Image: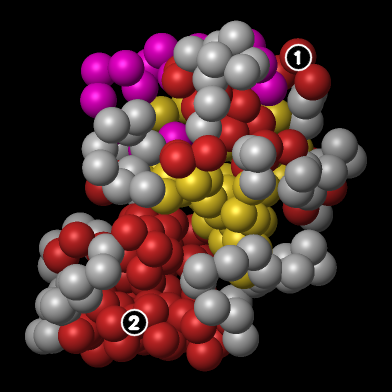
Amino acid sequence: MDQQVQKTFNFYCDESCHLESDEHRHMLISYVSSAYNQVQLHHEKIRQLKDKHNFYAEIKWSNISHSQYPFYAELIDYFFATDLKYRAIVIDKEQVDNDRFDQNYQTFYYKMYYQLLNHKMDMQYAYNIYLDIKDTLSALKVRKLRDILKLEYSAIRNLQNIHSHESLLMQLTDVIMGAIAYELNFDDKQVIAKQKLIKKIQDHSSFPLTGSTPKSSDKFNLFFIDLK
């Protein structure tokens, strides 16, 4: 088998509560990662789960309801039963002090993306990085990140925007990230199905969603960065 294919990984990146003034305290940047040669398998298995539960919509945290919970619960079970991995950088925006570092919020944003990707890359492997298209600035973000990351990481083979509906693994990123953001940013948690899914993630990972996991936690890795 082609060694280059064996040693290539895809990162499906998304962000939540990332705007400077969106009234949410905690910002998240995260990804689900998969070995390149396993991507199609994961897509097929998730499609089978969708068929099993007669689930035809896009997989999104914001859409979770009581009737859809069995599908989302089995999706989380699937994530933890496979070689898929999740990593998130969590930022307390009350700690952000751009004046101190003579930078603007956009520069800070790219630094956080650097933190997300920097510590989990192995130079002997190749990486394809996909970012969820959010708005008209998405193309600019990719160009800026390409400039920043490729200077240091020739291991990045491809970095591009995709629409979330194009990738079930990007949608999975949205669900896991959404659970963490919901736990951190919303005191009034009225959707019982979402509460149950948060508990399922915590039970699988053996860690709460409100603090950093150990550095050795590779399957499910949360890093609450201290900016003070």
Q: Position of residue 46 (x, y in %)?
A: 37, 71
Q: Is residue 152 left or right of residue 112?
A: right
Q: Does 138 appear above or below 17?
A: above
Question: 213 and 6: which one is in front?
Answer: 213
Provide the residue span drawn in magenta: 130-149
Callout 2, which amino acid?
Leu
- Return the x and y of residue 11 as percentages of the image width and height: 57, 46
Q: Nearer the viewer, residue 56 or 181?
A: 181
Point out the frontmost of discs 1 and 2. 2
Q: Is residue 19 left or right of residue 123?
A: left
Image coords of residue 33 (percent x, y): 59, 55
For the stretch drawn in magenta, the main secondary structure is helix
Tell me if I can see residue 48 in this picture: yes
Q: Secondary structure at mark 1?
A: helix
Tag 2 residue: 197
Q: Residue at x 53, y 51 (%)?
A: 90
User: In 3D space, how far apart are the residues under numbered discs 1 and 2 (Cα atoms)?
Assistant: 39 Å
| Residue pictured at 77% horizontal, 25% vertical | 153
Mark 2 packing: few (<14 Cα in 10 Å), some, or many (20+)? many
Q: Where does label 1 land, which residue? A: 151
Q: Residue furthest right?
A: 124
Residue nearest the observer in this picture, 142 or 25: 25
Identify the residue at image location x=64%, y=47%: 225
